[in-house]
Every structure is written in structure tokens, then in C-alpha cells.
Image (tube, coloured by chain):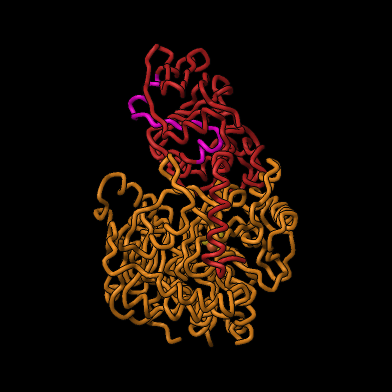
């Protein structure tokens, strides 16, 4: 029987079908962080339940740690230090691999799991953070779980889950000037709504996907969850194989030959049937930015806030109105030229070396406009070091950016830091929900290059007009 | 976990649509590495008056602060109750406050699932019926308590009305037997072991 890529991986991991309609799915890897992992480990210990397979579990500190230079265990988040210390003690006690704050491999969980070769094509991984779908870029299945599921994963090596329906999204044609993977995914969500893929796992394919490098595929898959997808995945190809080769945890020798051969089978069969299909012509994608408080509020950067007549019903109209009020915008208003007070380049969406390089190429020789607080948080220490070796840190700091330590940072304010109320921020992150970057902060999601161009201009700016 | 068969209690109306988990417990209130003791932060933004970041007094207008609802163990909710981020803290905070049942028109999906896993019963009823329950309990909440019977799938209102509800079988099972989420799976430990052994032979490269 013909199968999709998702079927092939999922079906081969089913331990047992349960009578409540869920499947007991075997997990190859579990990633945890100090915010939720600490609670899960403590709770398991209280119940006197061991971690079933400590070798498959990897822990990092990213959600609460400070990202200021010279940081230690103390953070701005009230009580945050407790999470960090508990995580360290419990991870050591349970015999887990921990990428602690000063470890050379430290960074944001979804970035380092790939960087270290822990996540590989064909594997299933879970982590208590919604953006675990990032790993789909390698042809793995990853999804975010809550604390109960996290405890379950640690104690049983499995999860109970319902197999989702399947959606395939084809991207055709070459990308236009200044258009990146971030713009592709924002465009998709803007066009089909934030619930467009509800209940579905989604496979990205087509010539434009083949053309993306692996780092861009991470950005794309990272935001699958903002489309309400169970996860996003791209079939592994030669680029994937060369990306994972020779990383610290990647197999070598004969096992490597074996897995490369196996990965060649990891693609949807020609006649595989999907529950839903979408095709996007990349010619219709411009650099994209969000105007409102949901990722679906995405428009061309040279476009205008929609009029209220665009709402399909009263409720939608009320939601649009309230989003505009929150964002301090009027219907029909243009985004280009809106003054900003903050710029953030970071997060598991857009803080890899290629993201920083592209932003740096725009920043080079320029200064951030007066009145803009600009922050860059590289996604991991290896990324930070590589960037520094290339002199990228100097370009950022010369431009007036703060150059930070790795962590989730201003992706959300649980690290205790935030932008101020009513400040307008261009951000390379994945969520523009109310209060995500600070109480009443107005977040506009965009690519790192759009963030960089806007930081220099002091207002929302079109990267195609910048002379970087 | 405490088994859930029947529960009788005071019902407090928070019939608002799209109450999200950030409102149920704001992230600044999630400052403990523990699932207990979060009741204090429940609905913090609605429950307290603030000076800066400090809670200075209870806001009398909020329903849970009114004496007749002090003992509330049932909440009447609106549409899409508990939507938003997957934070399970919302359910822990409700539980810590003594809430055992939430009756609403509909729930956020993850919130709904988290309820059963933590011993809370979430019941979906048509909006008119939730309104009716609110109406019938409003005058004297303490003497018009609701009886929720999971075995029969019935809510008995103070005026003798009976409202039927259904609960997904696996949630019902876990609640009725006080069965913990992990215990349920560990019944199949042999199957997990067997799978892991087979898999080790089939995919040695996937093992660490
Ligand atoms: S950077 Fe943001 S989305 Fe990514 S893991 Fe951290 S908090 Fe989650």
C-alpha cells in the first residue's frame, strides 16, 4: 500500500493500538528544558518513577536563563533560579545528558538537537515546547507536549497520541528578491488562517522546498504549529544527509551507511493520498510581516492593515478591531514607515548562522536608528562562536545591536525580560500573541533581514529598498 | 489520584468566551517548580488589585472573591474555555483552588485533555443549559448546589432538572478509577520492551 512520508515514520513507531483510539508511539528522543523539564522530573521523583531510558533524554537551559553577557544561574524571572538549579540537580540525578549554561554545546533546544546530530531523519522526538516541529526539516517527526505528556514520555519511552490527518503543501517557482523561508510560512498562514492545518500533519514539498537549504527548512517547519499543524516535515535529500553527517551524535561507519540507505526510502510514495493539498506559487510571495496579534495577520510588507469589511462575521470583526486597538493601528493603514522602538533577532525560528549572516549583510556599515533598542541572541554557543569567528558580532555591535548569550530570550518574556508597553518591535520570532514580548508590547513578525532593515531605518522598512 | 464518581458542590459562573490559559494563570504566577500551591495565582489578573507588581487587595467584583462563592468547586464557563497556550499550570491552579468540575459550552482542546489527566472533570453542555444552571444557582449558590454524577453522565440542578452529558471513554475510565495517566500505559510495559528489543536490531543507528 502506498504511504506518505509521515505514515512511514509514524507506522513504524507504533507499539500498540489502544482501545481508546490512540496509538502508543515509541519515542527515539526526548528533549527537555528547565521550565517544564524541571517540573516533570520533580514530579516523577515524587511518584518514585524512574526515567525509563536516560540515554535518549537530553536537557538544556533555554527558556528561563538570562541571555545577558556574563550571566549565571540568576535570572530576571522571579523564582527563575529555582527552575535552573532544580533542572541541574534532577537531570544529574536521573543520569541525563545536560547542556548546561556554560557547556560549549549549549543553546535553544530545537537548534542544538539538530546541531549535535541527536535529531536525525526518520526519528520521532518530543519536547515540552510547541516548536518541536522544527525538527521536521530533517525528515523527523517532532511535536510539542504538555507536562503530563512529558512525564509520560520520560517514564514510558512512549506517548499516547492520535494519528493526525495529512496535508501536503507544494511551493512552486523561484523566490523573489528579499523573500525567505520566513516569508513563505507567514504567507501560507496569512492566506489560509492560523487554523488552516488543524488536525493535520503537513509535508512541504516542491521545487522551492528542494531549493531551500536545511537552515531555511528549519525556519519553515518551526512555524508549522502556528498553522495549527500537528507537525511539519520535509523529505530528507542529499542536503539533509550532508547536514547531519559527522555531527557529534550522528552514527558513523557501518551504521552510517545503513541509515543513509534507509533514508533514501523516506519520501511519500508517488500515489500516496493526502487528506488535503495546497499549492502556493512563490511568485505571489513578497517579504511578509504581521500587523496584528496572530500569525495569520500576515501581509506583504508594502501592504496595508485590512479594512474591517474583510472580516467574515461579527466575531471576526470584533477580533480584528481588538487586534488593531492592541497594535495601535487603524484599518487600511500602511505598515511601511511605522516607527519602531525595538528589534529582535533570535529564537529557534531565525537565529542560525545563515540568519545572522543575512542580517549582518544588511547591517554592515549602518547604525541602528536612535530610539531603537536592538538585540541579537544567537541560537546556540556553536552558532555564536562561528559568527564571532567571521566577525559578525562586530557588525552587529558596531551597528548598535546588543550581542547576547544563547537562549530563548525575548521570544517570550518568561526569561523575565521584556520590551515596554506599547513599544513596537520588529522580531524574527514565531509568535505575536498579546503580551508575548512584554505587557502590551506590539510585536511584528518578520524575517531577520526585514528586522535588520527596519532597525536601521527606525521604522518598518522594506528590505528590497535597503542598500545592504 | 482521587477517583471521581460523584461530586456535589457550589457552582460559580465565569461565563466568558475564549478565557485563555494566560488569564486562568498569568505566566508571572508560575514561579514554582511544583504542581501544587498555584491556587494563589488563579485568575490573578481578575482577582486582585495591584500596585505595580504587588497584589494589594482582593477585587470584590470578581465572582470567586464573593463570600457565597468561597467554597465553589464547580465553574460554569463559556465558549472555548481554557484556550491558548498548552500550559498545564491552568489546570493545576484550578485544582489547587479546589475546583473539580468545569461545565462549559466548549473547551480549548489541550485544556480539555489536561483536565482528565489531573482528576478534573470537564463537561460540555449547550450554552442554554449552562445559562440555566447559572440562573438556577444565582440567588443562593450555597443552598443550590449541583450534583455531578460521572457514572450516570448526569448533572442534577437545584430545581430537579437533569442534564445529560457524555465523556470520552478513556477519560471517563481514568477519572472513575482514579487511574493515573502513566499507570494506564505501564499496563503495556511488555509490549514496549518487546518493541524496543526488535527496534534495536532493526535500527541500530537510531540508538544512543
Ligand atoms: S525560542 Fe521561543 S519558540 Fe523557540 S524554544 Fe524558545 S520559547 Fe520556544
Q: Is residue B118 magenta-colored?
A: yes
Residue in the image at 46% along x and 62% along y: A141
Residue in the image at 57% along x and 30% along y: B178
Magenta extent: B114-135
Give the image location of residue A441, x and y in percent: 51, 57
Give the image location of residue B144, x and y in percent: 48, 14
Against A198, residue B66 (above or below) is above
Count the marks. 0
Q: Nearer the viewer, residue A145 or A300?
A: A145
What tint does the image give chain A? Answer: orange
Q: Is residue B161 magenta-colored?
A: no
Left or right of residue A80: residue B103: left
Q: Can the viewer see residue A411?
A: no
Q: Quadrant of the N terminus of chain A?
A: bottom left
Q: Nearer the viewer, residue A237 or B167?
A: A237
Ligand 1's image quarter is: bottom right
Where on the picture, by quarter, is residue A376? bottom right
Where on the picture, by quarter, is residue A118? bottom right
What tint does the image give chain B? Answer: red
Give the image location of residue A72, x and y in percent: 74, 64
Give the image location of residue B159, x and y in percent: 40, 12
Left or right of residue B168: residue A35: right
Amino acid at each position: 500500500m502506498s504511504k506518505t512520508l509521515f505514515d512511514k515514520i509514524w507506522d513504524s513507531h507504533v507499539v500498540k493500538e489502544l482501545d481508546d483510539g490512540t496509538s502508543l508511539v515509541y519515542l527515539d528522543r526526548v528533549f527537555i528544558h528547565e521550565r517544564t523539564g524541571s517540573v516533570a522530573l520533580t514530579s516523577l521523583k515524587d511518584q518514585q518513577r524512574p526515567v525509563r531510558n536516560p540515554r535518549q533524554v537530553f536537557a538544556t537551559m533555554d527558556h528561563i536563563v538570562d541571555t545577558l553577557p556574563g550571566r549565571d544561574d540568576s535570572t530576571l524571572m522571579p523564582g527563575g533560579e529555582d527552575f535552573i538549579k532544580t533542572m541541574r540537580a534532577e537531570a544529574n540525578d536521573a543520569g541525563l545528558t545536560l547542556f548546561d549554561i556554560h557547556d560549549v554545546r549549549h543553546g535553544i533546544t530545537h537548534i542544538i538537537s539538530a546541531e549535535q546530530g541527536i535529531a536525525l531523519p526518520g526519528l520521532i522526538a518530543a519536547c515540552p515546547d510547541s516548536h518541536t516541529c522544527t525538527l521536521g526539516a530533517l525528515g523527523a517527526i517532532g511535536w510539542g507536549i504538555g507536562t503530563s505528556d512529558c512525564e509520560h514520555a520520560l517514564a514510558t519511552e512512549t506517548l499516547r497520541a492520535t494519528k493526525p490527518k495529512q496535508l501536503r503543501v507544494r511551493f512552486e517557482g523561484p523566490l523573489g528578491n528579499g523573500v525567505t523561508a520566513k516569508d513563505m510560512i507567514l504567507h501560507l498562514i496569512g492566506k489560509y488562517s492560523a487554523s488552516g492545518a488543524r488536525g493535520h500533519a503537513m509535508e512541504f514539498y516542491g521545487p522551492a522546498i528542494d531549493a531551500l537549504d536545511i537552515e531555511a527548512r528549519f525556519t519553515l517547519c518551526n512555524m508549522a504549529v502556528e498553522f495549527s499543524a500537528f507537525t511539519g516535515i520535509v523529505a530528507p535529500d542529499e542536503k539533509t544527509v550532508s547536514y547531519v553527517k559527522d555531527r557529534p551524535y550522528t552514527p558513523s561507519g557501518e551504521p552510517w551507511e545503513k541509515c543513509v540507505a534507509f533514508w533514501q526510502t523516506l519520501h511519500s510514495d508517488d500515489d500516496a493520498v493526502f487528506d488535503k493539498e495546497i499549492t502556493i506559487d512563490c511568485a505571489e510571495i513578497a517579504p511578509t510581516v504581521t500587523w496584528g496579534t496572530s500569525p495569520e495577520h500576515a501581509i506583504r510588507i508594502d501592504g496595508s492593515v485590512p479594512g474591517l469589511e474583510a472580516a467574515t462575521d461579527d466575531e471576526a470583526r470584533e477580533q480584528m478591531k481588538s487586534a488593531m486597538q492592541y497594535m495601535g493601528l487603524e484599518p487600511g493603514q500602511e505598515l511601511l514607515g511605522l516607527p519602531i522602538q525595538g528589534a529582535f533577532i533570535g529564537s529557534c525560528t531565525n537565529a542560525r548562522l545563515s540568519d545572522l549572516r543575512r542580517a549582518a549583510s544588511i547591517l554592515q556599515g549602518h547604525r541602528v536608528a536612535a530610539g531603537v533598542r536592538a538585540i541579537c541572541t544567537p541560537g546556540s554557543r556553536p552558532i555564536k562562536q562561528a559568527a564571532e569567528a567571521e566577525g559578525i558580532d562586530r557588525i552587529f555591535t558596531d551597528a548598535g545591536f546588543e550581542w547576547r548569550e544563547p537562549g530563548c530570550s525575548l521570544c517570550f518574556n518568561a526569561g523575565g525580560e521584556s520590551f515596554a508597553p506599547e513599544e513596537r518591535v520588529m522580531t524574527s520570532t514565531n509568535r505575536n500573541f498579546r503580551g508575548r514580548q512584554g505587557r502590551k508590547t506590539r510585536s511584528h513578525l518578520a524575517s531577520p533581514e526585514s528586522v535588520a532593515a527596519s532597525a536601521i531605518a527606525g521604522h518598518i522598512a522594506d528590505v528590497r529598498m535597503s542598500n545592504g | 489520584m482521587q477517583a471521581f464518581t460523584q461530586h456535589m458542590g457550589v457552582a460559580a459562573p465565569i461565563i466568558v468566551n475564549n478565557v485563555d490559559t494566560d488569564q486562568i494563570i498569568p505566566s508571572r504566577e508560575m514561579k514554582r517548580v511544583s504542581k501544587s500551591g498555584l491556587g494563589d495565582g488563579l485568575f490573578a489578573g481578575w482577582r486582585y488589585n495591584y500596585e505595580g507588581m504587588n497584589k494589594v487587595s482582593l477585587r470584590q467584583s470578581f465572582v470567586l472573591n464573593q463570600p457565597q462563592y468561597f467554597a465553589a468547586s464547580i465553574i460554569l464557563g463559556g465558549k472555548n474555555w481554557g484556550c491558548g497556550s498548552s500550559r498545564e499550570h491552568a489546570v493545576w491552579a484550578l485544582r489547587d483552588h479546589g475546583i473539580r468540575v468545569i461545565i462549559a459550552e466548549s473547551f480549548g482542546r489541550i485544556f480539555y485533555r489536561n483536565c482528565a489527566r489531573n482528576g478534573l472533570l470537564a463537561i460540555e453542555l449547550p450554552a442554554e443549559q449552562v445559562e440555566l444552571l447559572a440562573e438556577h444557582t444565582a440567588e443562593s449558590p450555597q443552598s443550590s448546589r449541583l450534583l455531578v454524577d460521572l457514572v450516570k453522565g448526569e448533572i442534577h440542578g437545584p430545581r430537579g432538572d437533569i442534564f445529560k452529558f457524555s465523556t470520552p471513554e478513556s477519560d471517563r475510565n481514568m477519572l472513575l478509577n482514579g487511574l493515573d495517566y502513566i499507570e494506564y500505559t505501564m499496563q503495556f510495559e511488555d509490549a514496549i520492551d518487546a518493541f524496543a528489543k526488535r527496534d534495536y536490531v532493526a535500527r541500530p543507528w537510531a540508538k544512543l
